[in-house]
Amino acid sequence: MFPTYDVIVVGAGHAGCEAAVAAANLGSKVLLATMNMQTIAQMSCNPAMGGVAKGQIVREIDALGGYSGIVTDHTMVQFRMLNLSKGPAMWSPRAQSDRMLFAHKWRMMLEAHPNIDFWQEMVIGLSVKGDQVTGVRTGMGLTIPCKSVVLTNGTFLNGIIHIGEKQFGGGRAGEKAATGITEQLIQLGFEAGRMKTGTPPRVDGRSLDYSRMELQPGDENPSKFSYTDTPKLEKQLPCHITYTNDEVHDLLKEGFDRSPMFNGRIQGLGPRYCPSIEDKINRFADKERHQLFVEPEGRDTIEIYVNGFSTSLPEDVQYKALRKVPGFENVKMFRPGYAIEYDFFPPTQLQLSLETHLVKNLFFAGQINGTTGYEEAASQGLIAGINAHQAINDLEPFILKRSEAYIGVLIDDLVNKGTKEPYRMFTSRAEYRILLRQDNADIRLTPLAQKLGIKGADERMDRVNAKIDAAQTIAKFFEETSVAPEDINGYLESKDSAPIRQKVKLQGILLRPNIDMTGLRQVLPVLNQFISQFEEEFTELAEINMKYEGYIKREQELVGKMNRLEEVRLLENFDYSKINSLSAEAREKLNKIKPRTIGQASRISGVTPADVSVLLVHMGR
């Protein structure tokens, strides 16, 4: 009935969709197995993509040939570039998506791919021969053969939904949990744990009074995520902001005795940086109010997502408290918020390729690894899909360094440090933020995609080369073009910048604080005429490269020093217990994680600089 697939992806959330596309675009024959074809790429929680550090990840996925950025550009209803008041390392794109269109567009793109087949049924286990996966087993008793498997089970593994004192099995509202896989993996020797996440109530937008809220419009000139020729966002929908108050907090507290979070029924740890509303008012009792973002779920629906009001309190408590929020006095609730508890597998059991140590050609991606967020899941799916293809073709695994991508930071953190609570990406987790900007993800990563042979990378490289050439041409113009005092001093004085007394090069003017290319173009017609021939994206890159050249060079030097440690390879199955001069903790951690390089070993929690020195001596360095 079934051929032997190259890759079977279990689960069709954000990680599963990117995994399927990545393997298929490298030439593998892929089967995407899901319990429900109607919920492919569903935005289970907030209807948005991107945000601080997450936006950089979406652009990195796109630069590597993934589809998340393309789908977002086709389906977004609002776009904002966050942190524009800060340096370019912090600029982060974020888009509100039309939730139904997002899932529809993903499904259409997957179905259009000739290398992807589908199967709708619960996968309850794996076929394993020796130490290698050979297929998956389904609830109807079928065995589907394959050469590799990527597990992207999200919150479905033994998922339990909590609403007040009620609890029932489920992987998402209205969908049953997945059983069987956890139990088999534990039998195979894997360690499992429990985590928790939550979602807020959904409400009827017709019942809200937006005049009592703050308007949050999109950017005047909206950008996009994909480096490909995706459509420009024309008509944006507004979001709104409102706040909780003491009355809301008091009503919520009345339900604390029935809260599964406070009475011990939920064992798993929730996301520290996205706490429930009851957790916020308990942990931050000194705060008089908490911000709520009122976000539309799409263009053609009245459903509203109440971002910031995630909760597992009883539905009657949620309803009473919501009605005391300004603008929500007459609110009608579509469904209450809930918490969900699910199984995950500590990611220290993985290699940097996301292949498991215990079972060959078995990969984990997404929330099964202890992460939270669509973007974090999608990026892991992409890497797991690529490496599933690489593994079955006896090719080198594709591993991104911390200096190459936020995706590299994410996976390096997970594998070397593990996580006991849902892991979320922040810019602060990356050492080389000025190198890992959202504007240069294509320059960093598309050459790697081309080298891998990912479909479409050659065409993308044409644009990357044009962008690099344009930035260099613009930089040369600034180096060679002089400006006279009478042409620029008025502008400089308006920016509290010292006037010039003789002609100076444009580059020197641009490097001053508070001076930018937009302002210079307004007062220098010759510059405006020259810059007008280039795309805005190209001029932005040129300006950042010129203004931050010193910082960029400094980080590149640090990367060079660190990469010397990455070049010292370690034996894959070396027994570190033989090196008595290593600390006991280092021997234990090194044997468990099996680092590929000295650089990776140095980032393992519990491995000290002294242990690294011992390894270098042992390696003859």
Image (cartoon, rainbow, N blue to C red):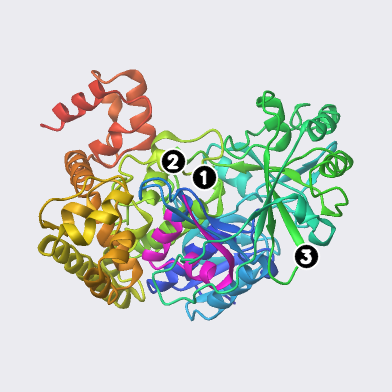
In which quadrant will I find the C terminus? top left
Residue at the image position 71 percent from the left and 26 percent from the top: 282
Asked if the stretch drawn in magenta spans residue 597, the answer is no
Mark 3 Cα-neighbour bin, 10 Å: few <14, some 14–19, many ≥20: few
- The answer to whether residue 583 is above or below residue 79 is above
Question: Does residue 36 appear left or right of residue 302 in this picture?
Answer: left
Q: Earlier in the sequence, mark 2 or mark 3?
A: 3
Residue 320, percent across and down? 88, 41
Where disc 2 sits, the SS reads helix
Is residue 155 visible in the rendered image? The answer is yes
Earlier in the chain: of badge 1 and badge 3, it is 3
- Mark 3 highlights which residue? 302
Which class describes the residues within 10 Å of circle 2: few (<14), some (14-19), or many (20+)? Answer: many
For badge 1, the amino acid type reads Asn
Q: Residue at x 73, y 72 (%)?
A: 300
Could you tell me residue 465's position as x and y percent? 23, 71
Q: Is residue 435 visible?
A: no
Bounds of the magenta segment: 56-82
| Quadrant into which the N terminus falls | bottom right
Residue denoted by label 2 = 414
- Mark 2 and mark 3: Cα distance apart in space: 39 Å
> Disc 2 and disc 1: Cα gap in Å?
8 Å
